Amino acid sequence: MSLATIFSRGRQGIHSPLVTVEVHISNGLPSLSIVGLPETAVKESKDRVRGAIQNSQFKFPSSRMTVNLAPADLPKDGGRFDLPIALGILAASRQINNDSLDTFECAGELSLGGELRAISGALPVALATGKADRMLIIPSANAQEAALATDAQVLAANHLLEVCAHINGQRLLSPAISTPFLNNSKECLDFQDVHGQYHVKRAFEVAAAGAHNLLMLGPPGTGKSMTAARLPTILPPLTEAQALETAAIASISELGLKPELWRQPPFRSPHHTASAPALVGGGNNPKPGEISLAHNGTLFLDELPEFDRKVLEVLREPLETGHVTISRANHRAEFPARFQLIAAMNPCPCGYLGDQSGRCHCTQDHIKRYRSRISGPLLDRIDIHIEVPRVSHLLLRDDQTQAQESSSTIRTRVINARNRALSRCGKQNAVLTPQELQKYCPITREGHQLLEEAVNKLGLSHRAYHRIIKLARTIADLGKSEAISIKHLSEAIGYRRLDRKNY
């Protein structure tokens, strides 16, 4: 009888809990059983492991073998346990050295020929392994992604034979080195492409500086989607901590992680037919949705009223808390979801209400029914409401002959404003608590009078009251002002367009 233990990692949300793979070989009829709450893909690993061992010129034991994946109450899925199971069988049968097995962890799917195939969620595995102070053996296809975890020593392999040679000390695997990426994409979008709409560009600058939510209201063809698509070009790059958290979410998703883009804020734009699980995440084994994939970045919802109302309502809690918890019968996962919401909508069903063309024939009932698809509680969580009117073709023609502000120029002001906020309170203005508002956002007596008048005349909620102060704090930061003046408050109140009574 013989026993071998290999360390690996499972998947639970964006976390990778430790899974101990125990392989026991004993006398009895030849069999291989896997216990420890394995799902179908894990149960099928016995056939992949048998083929990989035999085709790698090792002997597959003709004995009774039991593989235990501990802890037993943690569901195991995917092909990531193929490699540790194969190594456990080889170590238990004395075909490889088992003296150093406790110094590393491994994960990887095996082909029948013994080649290592990529797994999902390699970055969370590397982060957890680094904290455990062990080496990580991973397929070469995951090497660049796993190497983003600078605290982990990542070893990349292409074949089961390479891993066995490393364990036996015959040929050591070389550490994987991550190529430093900051912004390797060719930016073809720029704010200088947006002509006219100066108040819209100003609103986007304020939204970017404080990570505030924004809603555009205007007829079709006025540049709403065009402007929203250019928001990432004025956002500062993610810090390493933010980038790792965002990359970990992308790593476990079906899209996968592109290491060359990992420092860029994500920009997600789901279609209006998306379901609630598509937005917040879901499935039998919960996976992140669009709001988590947009973590530390932007979620753009075009044609906002065309989304199902029940789908939009699921955004209310994440907009406040910055995370979402998905519970199922046997699974529970929590994903971060601190995103900036940018939305666009038409003013009426036909889209031409208030347009210079005069083509709108919608009745007041039609308009009211159309706008009622967006609930008051959701609208209350959006800091900036702006109208995007149609620009005269004469103004558009004349504006094209003048030099426009580029995204890099606007980004410099945004970065300076964010740095002022970070040095003052260590966070973005949009997520300040009421206690922090009193400490970092003092308002003069005249300012309080203006706010009280706005609350009474516009019918603002307490949440909107606090969000106006946060918005004014960002406007003051853009103006390099430590004090919040009447001018800053007036501009912030002017952005609450849809809060006005009888609008």
Image: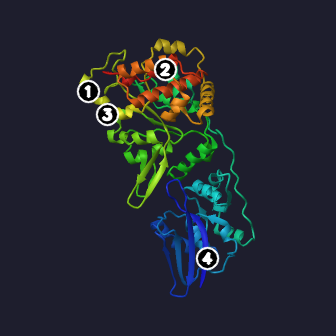
Q: CA distance from mark 1 to mark 4?
A: 71 Å
Residue marked by disc 3: 373
SS at circle 3: loop
- Image quadrant in which you'd find residue 404: top right
Residue 330 position, x and y percent, is 41, 61
N-terminal of the pair, mark 1 or mark 3, is 1
Binning the other alpha carbons within 10 Å of mark 1 as few (below 14), some (14 to 19) or many (20 upward) gives some
| Residue at position x 38%, y 23% in the image | 455
Q: CA distance from mark 1 to mark 2?
A: 34 Å
Callout 2–callout 3 Cβ contact below 8 Å: no
Residue marked by disc 1: 366
Indicate which label's residue lies in the foreground, 4 or 2.
Answer: 2
Residue 39 position, x and y percent, is 45, 66
From the viewer's perspective, is residue 325 above or below residue 344? below
The circle drawn on residue 4 is 4
Residue 131 position, x and y percent, is 64, 57
Indicate which label's residue lies in the foreground, 2 or 3.
Answer: 2
Out of 456 and 46, give the one closest to the viewer. 456
Q: Is residue 232 visible?
A: yes
SS at circle 2: helix
SS at circle 4: strand
Colour logic:
rainbow
SS at circle 1: helix
N-terminal of the pair, mark 1 or mark 4, is 4
